[in-house]
Amino acid sequence: ILMVGHHCALAGSTRLALGEYFRAYYTAPNDPLVALCIGVCYLNQVMSRRTPNRHFCVMQGMSFLFKYYELQRGSPEAMYNIARAFHQLGLPYLATFYTKVLESPD
C-alpha cells in the first residue's frame, strides 16, 4: 500500500497518495513510517498554489509528524525531520530541533 502511495506522490498526485497512505494508516496506525509519509505528503500539498485550505494541511501535516516523533520516541532522526518540516514551511526560527539533534549523543 505504501509503494502505491509513493508512486502517486512521485507522479504529483498528492490527494491520491494521501488516500493510499491513509489506507496503510488504518491497517497499521502505530507504524512511524506511515505517519511520516502522511505528514510529508500534507506538507508537500501546502506548497501547491491550488490547495484551497493551506492552514488545515499544515496542521494535519504537523500533527502526523509529531505522531511520528512520539512513535520514534524522540530519536535524532525524528527530531531532524521535524526541524526540516519547519524549515520547509519557512519557519526556521521554530526549527530548534536541529540543535537538539546536534546535542544528542547518538
Image: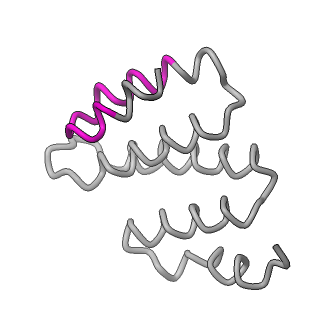
- The number of numbered discs placed on residues in the rendered structure image is 0
| Magenta: main secondary structure | helix
Task: Examine the image and state in which quarter residue 101 appears.
Answer: bottom right
Quadrant position of the C terminus in the picture = bottom right
What's drawn in magenta, residue-wise?
7-23
Q: Is residue 52 above or below residue 49?
A: above
Queried whether the magenta region covers residue 16, the answer comes back as: yes
Residue at the far left in the pictured view: 50
Q: Please state the horizontal and vertical placement of residue 60, each as a whole percent of the image.
A: 48, 42
- Is residue 46 or residue 3 the one in the foreground? 3
In this rendering, position of residue 75 left or right of residue 24:
right
Q: Please state the horizontal and vertical placement of residue 89, each as a whole percent of the image.
A: 38, 66
Queried whether the magenta region covers residue 99, the answer comes back as: no
Q: Please state the horizontal and vertical placement of residue 71, each as a whole percent of the image.
A: 75, 43
Q: Is residue 2 above or below residue 94?
A: above
User: Which residue is at a point 65% across and 74% down the rendered structure image?
Assistant: 97
How has the structure been colored for display? one colour
User: Which residue is at a point 33% across and 50% down the rendered structure image?
Assistant: 44
In this rendering, position of residue 19 left or right of residue 95:
left
Q: Is residue 5 above or below residue 78?
A: above
Residue at the far right in the pictured view: 105
User: Which residue is at a point 55% across and 75% down the rendered structure image?
Assistant: 94
- Is residue 94 or residue 44 the one in the foreground? 44
